[in-house]
């Protein structure tokens, strides 16, 4: 992995983020191609892709940021093989279960923060609102959070990264944009995931709506082709963004690829 601020895409919504001297893992999903991810309530989906690496190949981590507890975001391999020392920053219901599994999990309510410190550097993780589904489907799915990662040196903010989590678009994004108008990089979960005839993650049209609502210098799309329930390919999002004049700043990344997210 190269120097500077970077994101390495492992697959699904799993990334390794390097911000200054901090290293974070997001939504750890290491299932192999052909294995099933269990989504609760008897639901499952088969993985179509191979992750770029396994837990043994991860660098030392300062924290894990988990948007929610679903089998395609925290799987049985992660449960078995991840180091239990770094804090896992997640929703309160997910934290309760993870603590039973021996992880140092910290539950963050919406707008709550957790700060990591190294010398004169700080990295603050703030829980942001997310909506996995609406109506009846919303009651069947676990709570989800987005996250704002704010890296500061000597008290001065130098980088803000927004992790969308598995959310649909809506007025909650307008609230996030109002409170955090300056975002350097947005890591956006797409895929148009369909479960029981309901869309539970952003498809191409919602992804473009996200671009309209949330201003960021750079957008990194993830979570778009790894499972059978993902129905909206990345190509649809990219094509629609181009047609709408919103493609500037979109940074696609391949599994296993590391790209710079240094502040512009």
Image (spheres, rainbow, N blue to C red):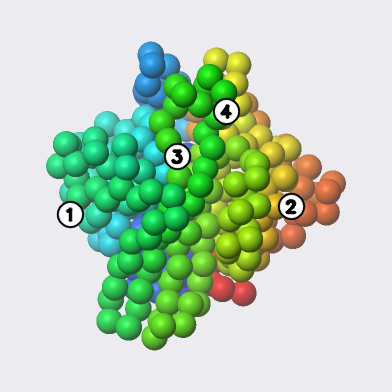
Tell me which numbered mark, 1 or 2, is placed earlier along the sequence: 1
Label located before the other in sequence (3 or 1) = 1
**Residue 180 in sight:** yes
> Measuring 48% from the left and 59% from the top, which residue is drawn there?
148
Measure the C-alpha gap from mark 3 to mark 2.
22 Å
Q: Which residue is mark 2?
A: 212
Q: Which residue is mark 4?
A: 134
Q: Nearer the viewer, mark 3 or mark 4?
A: 4
Q: Residue 11 or 172: which is nearer the viewer?
A: 172
Q: Are marks 2 and 4 in contact (CB under 8 Å)?
A: no
What crowding class fits label 2: few (fewer than 14 Cα within 10 Å), some (14-19), or many (20 or more)? some
| Depicted 93 relative to depicted 220: above or below | above
Q: Nearer the viewer, mark 2 or mark 4?
A: 4
Quadrant for the C terminus, please. bottom right
Find numbered disc 2 in the image and state the secondary structure of the residue it sits on: helix
Secondary structure at badge 3 equals loop
The residue that disc 1 covers is: 85
- Residue 85 vertical position relative to residue 22 in the rendered view, above or below: above
Q: Quadrant of the N terminus?
A: bottom left
Marks 4 and 1 sit apart, C-alpha to C-alpha, by: 35 Å
Circle 3 crowding by C-alpha within 10 Å: few under 14, some 14–19, many from 20: many
Residue 144, numbered label: 3
Sequence-first disc among 4 and 1: 1
Instruction: Check whether the beta carbons of the residues at disc 3 and disc 4 lie within 8 A of each other.
Output: no
The quadrant in which residue 140 appears is top left
Relative to 36, is 192 on the left or the right? right
| Left or right of residue 110, residue 218 in this image | right
Q: CA distance from mark 1 to mark 2?
A: 39 Å
Q: Is residue 67 left or right of residue 105?
A: right
Residue drawn 52% across and 21% down? 137
Residue depicted at 30% across the width and 68% down the height: 116
């Amino acid at each position: 992995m190269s120097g500077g601020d970077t994101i390495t895409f492992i697959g699904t919504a799993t990334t390794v983020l390097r911000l200054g001297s901090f290293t974070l893992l997001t939504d750890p999903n290491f299932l192999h191609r052909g294995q099933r991810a269990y989504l609760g309530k008897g639901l499952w989906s088969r993985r179509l892709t191979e992750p770029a690496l396994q837990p043994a190949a991860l660098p030392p981590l300062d924290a894990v940021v988990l948007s929610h507890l679903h089998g395609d975001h925290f799987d049985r391999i992660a449960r078995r093989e991840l180091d239990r020392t770094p804090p896992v920053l997640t929703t309160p219901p997910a934290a309760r279960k993870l603590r039973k599994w021996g992880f140092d999990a910290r539950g963050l309510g919406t707008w709550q923060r957790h700060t990591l410190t190294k010398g004169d550097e700080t990295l603050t993780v703030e829980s942001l609102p997310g909506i996995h589904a609406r109506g009846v489907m919303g009651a069947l799915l676990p709570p989800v959070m987005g996250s704002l990662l704010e890296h500061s040196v000597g008290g001065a903010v130098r980088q803000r990264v927004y992790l969308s989590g598995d959310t649909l678009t809506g007025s909650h994004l307008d609230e996030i944009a109002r409170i955090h108008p300056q975002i350097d990089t947005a890591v956006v979960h797409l895929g148009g995931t369909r479960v029981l005839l309901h869309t539970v993650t952003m498809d191409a049209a919602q992804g473009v709506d996200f671009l309209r609502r949330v201003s960021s210098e750079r957008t990194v799309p993830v979570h778009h082709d790894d499972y059978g329930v993902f129905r909206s390919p990345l190509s649809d999002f990219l094509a629609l963004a181009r047609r709408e004049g919103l493609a500037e700043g979109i940074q696609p990344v391949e599994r296993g690829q590391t790209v710079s997210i240094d502040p512009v």
